Image (cartoon, rainbow, N blue to C red):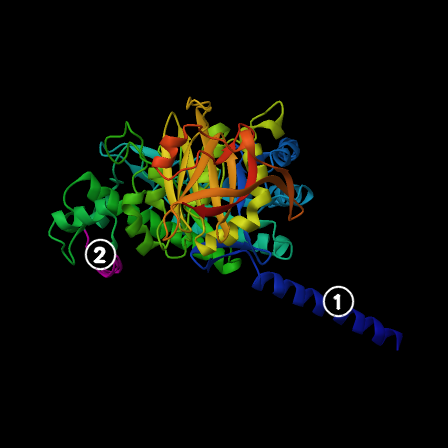
Amino acid sequence: MLKLVKTSTILSIILSSFLSLSFAQSSAPRLEKRGQATQLIVDGKPFLLLAGELHNSSSSNLDYLNTLWKPLKQQHLNTALVAVSWELVEPQEGKFDFSLVDGILKGGRDNNLKIVLLWFGSWKNGLSHYAPEWVKKDTRRFPRIKLENGRSTETISALSTEAMNADAKAFAALMKHVKKADASKQTVIMVQVENEVGVIGAARDYSDFANVEFAKAVPSELMQSLIAHKNELQPQLKSLWEQNGSKTGGTWSQVFGKSASADEAFMAWNYAKYINTVTAAGKAEYNLPMFVNAWIVQPEDKRPGDYPSGGPQSHVHDIWRAAAPTVDILSPDIYLQDTKGITAMYKHSWNPLFIPESFAGLDGAANAFYVIGRHDAIGYSPFGIDNKAEKPAETPIAKAYNILSQLTPEITKAQSEGKITAFTLKADSVQTAELAGYKINVTLRKNWSGVTQASQGYGLVINTAPDEFTVAGSNIDVTFVPLSAGPKMAGLSWVREGIVENGVWKPGRLLNGDNIMISYKLAEQAAVNKTGTGIRLLDEPSISKLKLYRFE
């Protein structure tokens, strides 16, 4: 009888563990369309990645990595982007070492941080420095890209089936291990596959094998996709195709012309197909959301190859869309000031927005608010977040993330309902948006004489109920003018500052008087249907809630 009881107990434990693992797998982190936004769902709820990417080598040594977790938490991060390199995972072919991966998972869990793994496999920044030594040394089995002058590079060719299969095998082993070690805990919530891929130094691979492939017909799979999406293609690719007669078949030169752009299209197809194979192998083991990132075109770049040619640039998104259906997101790494223009090029109906690399500092704080509030981004991540700061909690990104973390449930609800907008301002700019029957006017913070008091500001506005809004940010003045039928003026019924603590709004001061006056030039204000009052957000990022009333 005692033996039977023990057996039953063991069976019960096994069944319980199986059911727990099955539930964890069925509810794994995923991308899901909710209302008007595609959102990242973690633990059953929409999740905003208030993230930061560590320097490339920070995760290559656990003793070093373990010194970084505390300051990351002090900056109000909820997620760390951490590199895992092929050379450290598979130092000898077929022999895997996941001790660093386990250390990353433990560090994340111990510090209540989610993890996005960055797979530095065949390529990192377009080059192959993170491939194992056994891959680097075997140039016959794993051929390299050749430039137009016939010289070889260190970069693995995207047309190498052997390299693709070896990379896919290693990535699958990684994801299998992550599933076993983490599926029930869900520390890892997304994975980046490779990093900033593309040919550097030439528009395409000029190896003998690549030349043969380039002379062949454009794959029918790509042609069918271009034809099916003809009316929604990105302008540059659409123009390239039309300039060459909108052919429905032919070689790469016949369809796209004899140009560097045709070379780039060829490489985009081959990089995307390669990465699709790697991604599919990983997802077959553990189906987490996966993305690729782009080293975007810089102002000084003259042609493909000055930037990584064939990478997921916005002008070849339609090729990537056709060639890499297992990739969930094409993401821009933004180190230029035109965040608004760049993000607009990467947000498509089929491509949610995530920024895995960008600025920290004030620019980063502003960008995080902007992409989350204006483009329903699933998150933002400055690069080099582990740079030493004397007071991590006082950095601009820490203060911005503090506000965004308080408002996350309200933000994600508003994203799905289309009831949120955002602003980022520099110099003496003015921005407007329409939301819930009002025109929202935003300027940098001014004094009552109209003199600008700040050089940079940012904020978001959420419509929470009829005539009610949440406004959050720094160094901006916000006013509301009615657009819907009825009285043309909008006054402030009330304004409350406050904080969200443990998910509960805790109101602070009731703001009035000096705290809501933006201008005493009432005649000028009335002429444009304004009252002279509004929301004034000072240098320290903050949250205010308000209700409007209408009058004439």
Reading the image, the residue beneath label 2 is 231
**Is 425 situated above or below 258?**
above
Magenta stretch contains residue 454? no
Residue 33: x, y in percent? 45, 59
Residue 443: x, y in percent? 41, 32
Residue 234: x, y in percent? 25, 48
Could you tell me what secondary structure mostly forms the magenta stretch? Answer: helix
Three-letter code, disc 2: Asn
Q: What span is colored magenta in the figure?
A: 216-230
Three-letter code, disc 1: Ile
Q: Is residue 360 left or right of residue 232?
A: right
Camera-nearest label, 1 or 2: 2
Q: Residue furthest left?
A: 245
The answer to whether residue 137 is seen in the rendering is: no
Q: Nearer the viewer, residue 548 or 313?
A: 548
Residue 162: x, y in percent? 39, 50
Reading the image, the residue beneath label 1 is 13
| Residue at the image point whose x is 36% and y is 48% from the top | 483
**Circles 1, 2 touching at the beta carbon (< 8 Å):** no
What is the quadrant of the N terminus in the image? bottom right
Element marked by disc 2: helix
